[in-house]
Amino acid sequence: MVFNFAAGTTIPVAFLLSTLACMAQKPQNDELAKPINMGVPEAMLEAGNRGAIDLVPLLREHVTDPRQPRYSWTGRWDTPEASQLALAKLGQKMQQQQIACELAYGNLAEQSLAFEKIGYVGGWFAITHLAAFLADSQYNSRFLPEPGMPPTDDTVGTRQQVAIRTLDAMFLLGAPRPGTEDPFLAVPRRSKEWLRYIDIHRGELTKLLPADESAADSEDYCENYLASLKNRPDSYDIGEDDGTVSVVTIEQRGFGDSQGNAIFNGRNVPIRSWTDSSVTVELPSHATGKLEIVKANSKAIAIVIHAD
């Protein structure tokens, strides 16, 4: 159907309705501009929820705002995090890739937080990255700490369990739903149900925005991005300490399967175990300093160790 506005001029109905919808939404989006300029996280998240593409330039102005340790402020997200989330939800490639890096290569605290981030972003972007944690494996059975916090005895569940919980919260049409059994005991069954659902409905799911066109998690890019972050949470766990030696484990993906070296304050230290996602070393008891995990390809990952 078309409308005739003048001799020889026609406008398709679909185009007209789309234009009217944008005109109606713009005044509402304008209401968010001032609080976004002021750095209000809630306004940024609302812009993402509304699909307010016209506010992308304002949101970008806050991606480099100073970051603060999570324990030093109140609220779920600080300003640069909220800006990152809104931009990712609005389909911006760089912010999508950053979140993909945090989920795939971040330390335990960063990864736990990234599950919450990807749950907000949603779409096929979230589904395809969450699917990577559904398979039964030792890696996916690792328990995660509270989001953004160093490892403690308090956990939010295994990677596999958190992935299922995040997918459940998306309320996808026809998706498997939790039953009445204990959530932890139900993980093996529910992970298979989700994998089967994603495989069967892939055609429809890939159309859910934001898509996953560009959120590749290149190891080199991710290492550089994560190393650039300020005020990162501690990424190590101190196990036994006999007063002379502390056994320290660092967990994050990307160490490689071939063992490299470990250097603490400029000196080589013994390595107890090495896998792609976990390295355990022996350090002097109660020592503070810089630990470098040097991979087989000579690239190093640096971690600052704090004495108790």
Image (cartoon, rainbow, N blue to C red):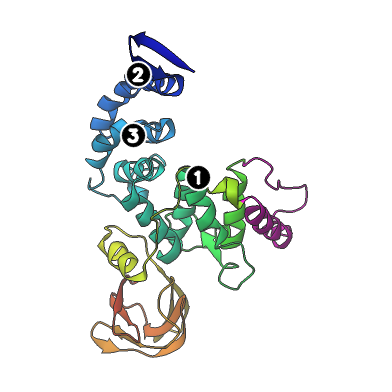
Can residue 236 be seen here? yes
The residue singled out by tag 2 in the image is: 23
Can residue 107 be seen here? no
Q: CA distance from mark 1 to mark 2?
A: 25 Å
Give yes or no for residue 74 being in the magenta stretch.
Answer: no
Q: Earlier in the sequence, mark 1 or mark 3?
A: 3
Nearer to the camera, 136 or 305:
136
Classify 236 as above or below 95: below
Q: Earlier in the sequence, mark 1 or mark 2?
A: 2
Query: Seen in the image, is 297 located left or right of residue 279?
Result: left
Q: Position of residue 97 (x, y in %)?
A: 36, 56
The residue singled out by tag 1 in the image is: 123
The segment highlighted magenta reads 172-201
Q: Amino acid at mark 2?
A: Met
Number of numbered discs visible in the structure rendering:
3
Name of the residue lying farthest toward the top: 6
Q: Tell me the element at label 2.
A: helix
The residue singled out by tag 3 in the image is: 53
Badge 1 vs badge 2, beta-carbon distance below 8 Å:
no
Categorize mark 1 by other alpha carbons within 10 Å: few (<14), some (14-19), many (20+).
Answer: many
Among the 4 quarters of the image, the one containing residue 158: bottom right
Q: Amino acid at mark 3?
A: Ile
Q: CA distance from mark 3 to mark 2?
A: 13 Å
Badge 1 vs badge 3, beta-carbon distance below 8 Å:
no
Q: Amino acid at mark 1?
A: Gly
Q: Position of residue 88 (x, y in %)?
A: 38, 46
